[in-house]
Image (cartoon, coloured by chain):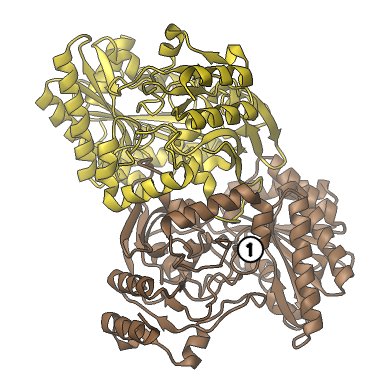
Chain colours: A brown, B yellow
Amino acid sequence: MGNDALLTKLREALGKDAVLTDTDVTESYSRDMMPLAPSGRPLAVVLPSDVEGVQATVRACAEAKVPIVPRGAGSGLSGAANAIDGCVVLVMTRFDRILEVDPGNRLAVVQPGVVNLDFRNAVEKHGLFYPPDPSSYDWCTIGGNLSTNAGGLCCVKYGVTTDAVLGLEVVLADGSVLKTGRRTVKGVAGYDLTKLFIGSEGTLGVITQATVALRPLPQAPATLVAGFDDTEKAGEAVTRIVREGLVPSLMEIMDASSIKAAEHYLNTDLGTGDECQALLLCQSDSGGEVARRELAVIEQICNDCEATMAYATDDLEEGRMLMQARRVVLTALEEYGIWLTDDVSVPRTRIAELILGCQRISDEVGLRIAVVGHAGDGNMHPTIVYAPGSEEEFQRARKAFDDILEVALSLGGTITGEHGVGRIKREWLEREIGPVGIRVHRQLKQALDPENLFNPGSMFSMA
Amino acid sequence: MGNDALLTKLREALGKDAVLTDTDVTESYSRDMMPLAPSGRPLAVVLPSDVEGVQATVRACAEAKVPIVPRGAGSGLSGAANAIDGCVVLVMTRFDRILEVDPGNRLAVVQPGVVNLDFRNAVEKHGLFYPPDPSSYDWCTIGGNLSTNAGGLCCVKYGVTTDAVLGLEVVLADGSVLKTGRRTVKGVAGYDLTKLFIGSEGTLGVITQATVALRPLPQAPATLVAGFDDTEKAGEAVTRIVREGLVPSLMEIMDASSIKAAEHYLNTDLGTGDECQALLLCQSDSGGEVARRELAVIEQICNDCEATMAYATDDLEEGRMLMQARRVVLTALEEYGIWLTDDVSVPRTRIAELILGCQRISDEVGLRIAVVGHAGDGNMHPTIVYAPGSEEEFQRARKAFDDILEVALSLGGTITGEHGVGRIKREWLEREIGPVGIRVHRQLKQALDPENLFNPGSMFSMA
C-alpha cells in the first residue's frame, strides 16, 4: 500500500478531520519540548476519537509499513514523541473523557487525552487525590504521563505514575486490544503487563484507557524553608531527614545558581544571605499538630546541619509564596538564554556530590547550570543555559548535558529519573543497563511489535 | 546430554552436596502447601550457593533439555513451585545473606533465600520497615515473595512486594545475568523489567538478588474490633471507611464461620454475641492521638452501620489478644478437617457479596467454608474444610474452590489476589485475561525463555 492509499484508507476509517497532512499542522505535531532531540517530517497526523479509530490506524499503518509515533500534548523532555520522516503521528488528545470516578473503591477510569490537572480537579471533587504531578501538569496528558511513567513533586511520599495504575487498555501492533490489570487493589493473575507498558514510551502499544487508584485528599501543606552556606551541609540535612524516618510530602532543593535566578526574577531577597549555596524546601501534608511536629524535627535537623536560616509556617498563603522561588526557576532562567534541562536520579545521600559536580561542569563548559531537584527522592534537574542562535554554545550545552549523566552514573544513579530515554539518551541507556539489559529490551520489543511499528529507534535501536 | 551426564556435570560445577537425588529428599522438595496442585518426581534437587552455581545449573539443564522448577521454602499456595516429572528443582535457600542495609538511602540488598521474618528483624534494627508480611512470614523466603508478588496484612496501607522492590539480579534462560532497576528511588531508564519478573512465578528466570526500598518503622498499632449481625452492614462499614479517606494499617474481616472456629479453638467468647455474622478488625499505626482519632472515626462509622459491638484500644497487649482471633483461624479449622484456602480479590465495595456467595456455596457443597480476608484491599481467603481421606469430599471442596473464583469474577474481581496462578488456576487465568492476554503472556515467555526451560506448564501453557 502506497502513502496515498494509506491516507485514503485512514480518512475512510476515521473521517477527514482526523487525518491531517497540511505541513504547517504536521510540523506543529512533530516535536516535544526537548531541544536536543532530532525530529522528522511526518506523512500525516492522525487524531482518533475511539479505540476502533486507533485499531484502524494501527492496522492500516502496519499494512503500509508506515511507522507510528504515538503522542499526547507534547510536553515531553526526551524527544520520545518526536516524529520520524514519513511516520504517522498518532495524537491521543481526543481521548479526553473521564469515564468513571468510584469513591467507594477509590479508583477512576480515564482516557489518555485528559489533561493531568483536569483529572486532578475532577477527582478532588470526590475528596480524592491523584498524586503524579509533573511540572507540566496544567497541559500534559495522562497518556503521556503513563508512557513516560511521569513523576513530579509528589513522589517522595506518593510515588510515580506506575504506582497509581491498576490496569490499562492497549492497542497492540496487530490492532488487537489488550486489557491489563484489574479494578481491585491487589491482584497477581499473570505477568504485570500494566507496569511493562507504563514507561515504555510508546514503543510497545497505544494506551487507550487507564484504571487508576486514588488516594484520600491530603491536608493543606505546612511549609519549611532552610538555607545553607555549604551544599554538603544541605545534603547532610537531607540524609538525616531520611534516616530520621521522616516522609515529607515535598522536599525540594535549589542550588546557588537557581536561588540567584529566582531572586533576580522575583526582584526579592529570599532571606538566605549572599553566601547561600543551597535552599531546602519541605512540606508536610499530615495536617495540624502532626505536620507542625514533622516540620519542627526537620527544622532541628537543618539547624544541627548549620543552616544559616530555617523557617516553618502552616499559613497556606505564606507557604505558597515560599514555594514560588522553586516554581519560577525555569522561567527565571529564560532571562539568561535558552534552557536545557537534564534529569538524573542519584541515591539520596549523594545529592550534594551531584550538585558540586554540576558546578564543576558549569565552570568547565563556561555555561550557567542551575540545579533544582526533588531532594526527597534524589531526582535532580540540572538545567543548562545557552545563548539562542549560538551553535557553539549549544554544543557546549550538549557536552554539559552528557557530562552530568556521567557524574550521575558515577554516583550510583540513573540517567533518567522521570523524563525518559526517548531520542536523546539511547546510548546512555545501553551504558546504564548493559548488553544483557539491551538484549532483553530488544527481545520484548520483538515479541510484542515484531515489525517495529511503534516509535522505532526511540529508547533503543533494534540492531 | 543424558540425565547421568547432566548430574555429573552439575556435581562437578556445584559440588556433590548441592545435587541431591535420593528420592526421600527429592520428594520433600516436590510440593508446596497447595493440596489441589499436581506434582511430579524430580530428577534432582539442586541447591546452589552463588550466582555462578545458578548459571551452571541453567546452562547444563538447557543443554540437556531438562526443565527447571525454581523454589524457595515451599510455603506457596498455588503449586507454582511443584516439581514436574524429570525436572531439576532449583532450591534457592542457600542464598541466605542480607548483603547490605543502607539507612541513609532507606534500602537493602538481599538474597532470595533469606526468610521474610529474618529480613524484617534485621532491618528493624536500623529503625526500618519491610512491609510485605504474608501469613507464612516466619518461614517463607524473600525469593518466593518476589516470585509470587506476595502480599499480607500490610497491603491496605503499604502495598505488595512489587511496591517495595527497586531492582533485581536474575539469571536468564541462556545463563546470562540480567540486572534490572536501580538503587535510586526514581528511575525510568528502559522498560520496567523489575516488575515483569516479580510475580512471574519462576517462569522467566531465577532471581538471585533484590534491592528493596524500606520505610520508616511505624508506630505501635492501636486496635479496634467491631461485630455485626449482618454481613452487608459490615461490608457497608468497609465501604464508608474507604470513602471517608481513612487508611488503616490493617483492616481484616472474619465471617460467622471463622468467628465460631476461632471462639471454639480459643475456648472463649469474642463478645460478639451468637448472632454475629462478621467481625471487623482494624489497626492504625499512626501513633498517639492521631491513631486514637482514626480509630474513633472508624468506631463511629461501625456504630452508624449498626455494629452490635465496637471496641478500640491503644494497649499493645490487648490489641495482640484481639488480633489473635484472626490469627488462629486456619489452625482452628484443622479441628474440623483439612483446609483448602482460596484467594480472590474483589472491589472493596463487594466484600459482603463475596462472603454471602461463599455461604451459598458452602450450603450447596455441604462443606464448611470460613472466610477471612484483607477487607482493606478486598483480598479474601475463603477456606474450605473437608474430611481427610475422603476423595468424595475432596472433589466437593475442589468444586467449591472453583465456584468461589466464579463468584469473584462476577463481582469484578480477580482469581488471585496474592497466592498466584501456579498449577491450579491456569484455565482461570485464561478466562480472566482473555485470549489476547494469554497470547501476550506466551509471546513474552517465548521471548525470554524460548526453550520453555523455566517452570513449564505453570501459570499458562505455551500451546
Q: Locate residue A58 relative to residue A386 in the image: left or right.
A: left
Q: Which residue is drawn at 89% across and 69% down?
A: A363
Q: Locate residue A407 relative to residue B71 in the image: left or right.
A: right
What is the x, y in percent for residue B171? Answer: 57, 36
Near-viewer residue (B125 or B297): B125
B163 to A20, vertically: above or below: above
Identify the residue at the far left of this view: B364
- Is any atom of residue A433 visible in this view? yes
- Is any atom of residue A276 visible in this view? no
Near-viewer residue (B422 or B241): B422
Q: Locate residue B421 relative to residue B286 in the image: left or right.
A: left
Q: Which amino acid does label 1 sit on?
A: Arg
What is the x, y in percent for residue B183? Answer: 66, 45
A87 to A130, vertically: above or below: below
What is the x, y in percent for residue B144? Answer: 48, 29
Identify the residue at the far front of this view: B1
Q: Residue at x 46, y 28 (%)?
A: B68
Identify the secondary structure beneath mark 1.
helix
Q: Quadrant of residue B323?
A: top left
A348 to B100, vertically: above or below: below
Classed neighbour count for the residue bearing mark 1: other residues with Cα under 10 Å, few (<14), some (14–19), many (≥20):
some
B401 to A203, vertically: above or below: above
Q: Quadrant of residue B390?
A: top left
Residue marked by disc 1: A426
Q: Residue at x 50, y 37 (%)?
A: B205
Near-viewer residue (B152 or B422): B422
Q: Locate residue A318 relative to residue A106 in the image: left or right.
A: right
Chain ID, mark 1? A
Near-viewer residue (B91 or B100): B91
